[in-house]
Image (tube, rainbow, N blue to C red):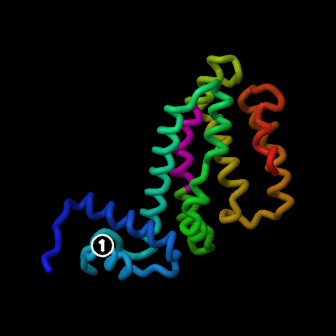
């Protein structure tokens, strides 16, 4: 059987997307490189040309998920109506990336993947912060927020969420998680110069 020759960037992306699907349906542990090869009908030499190991492929899959999440947020932002606070609330409450890619996210929580997990959280932070900063800037123009450093404020807030509530980074106790979660609304309001109670929606459904 003659195999189809594709451009390297296309073939690499096909491998990533197929692995993402398999990791989610069969789990990371339950998926082999051979499974990905069989799904795409490619040779062993082809997949190992792009990815030296399944762990390297996991990193590429997670970067792909991050990029897709950013694109979804940017597209959503284009459709949202209302003031900056209303848009922020919608963006935060509709963040379902972790749930949609639960198997991949769980693999990142393995102790052996701590360094990879941390690197990817930093990448997510860098890519997401400008989106939220644009909403903070809108809120400043509307008089909802009083903030001198929109991008840095977005970075601080996202860092707090990502690192202080992620049990894959550290085995935070339930008490740690609870006290931080309850403090987030007040702390964000102080960071953004928002009215008291503006971010209570973050804990209303706890």
Q: Residues within 10 Å of mark 1 (few under 14, many from 20)?
A: some
Q: Which residue is tagged 1? A: 40
Does residue 127 show up magenta in the picture? yes
Image coordinates of residue 10 in percent, x first then y, are 26, 59
Identify the residue shown where x is 69% and y is 49%: 161
Q: Position of residue 71 (x, y in %)?
A: 46, 44
Q: Is residue 63 above or below residue 93?
A: below
- Which quadrant holds residue 176? bottom right
100 drawn magenta? no
31 is higher (above) or lower (below) than 163: below
**Secondary structure at numbered mark 1:** helix
Horizontally, is 90 left or right of 201 in the view? left
- Tell me: residue 90, above or below residue 121: above
Q: Residue 185: name its quadrant.
A: top right
**In this figure, what is the number of numbered marks?**
1
Q: Quadrant of the N terminus?
A: bottom left
Residue at position x 35%, y 74% from top? 52
What's drawn in magenta, residue-wise?
A: 121-133
Q: Nearest the camera: 165 or 93?
A: 93
* Image x and y of residue 27, in percent: 53, 75
The reply, left or right, for residue 179 in relation to residue 65 is right
């Amino acid at each position: 059987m003659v195999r189809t020759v594709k451009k390297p960037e296309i073939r690499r992306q096909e491998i990533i997307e197929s692995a993402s699907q398999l990791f989610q349906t069969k789990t990371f542990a339950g998926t082999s490189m051979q499974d990905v090869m069989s799904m795409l009908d490619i040779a062993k030499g082809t997949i190992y040309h792009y990815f030296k190991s399944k762990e390297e492929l996991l990193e590429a899959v997670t970067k792909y998920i991050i990029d897709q999440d950013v694109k979804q947020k940017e597209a959503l932002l284009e459709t949202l109506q209302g003031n900056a606070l209303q848009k922020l609330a919608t963006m935060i409450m509709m963040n379902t990336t972790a749930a949609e890619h639960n198997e991949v996210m769980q693999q990142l929580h393995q102790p052996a993947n701590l360094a990879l997990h941390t690197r990817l959280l930093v990448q997510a932070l860098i890519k997401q912060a400008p989106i939220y900063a644009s909403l903070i800037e809108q809120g400043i123009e509307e008089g909802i927020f009083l903030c001198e450093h929109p991008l840095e404020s977005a970075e601080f807030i996202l860092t707090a969420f990502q690192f202080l509530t992620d049990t894959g980074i550290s085995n935070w106790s339930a008490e740690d998680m609870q006290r931080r979660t309850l403090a987030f609304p007040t702390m964000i309001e102080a960071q953004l110069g928002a009215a008291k109670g503006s971010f209570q929606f973050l804990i209303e459904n706890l």
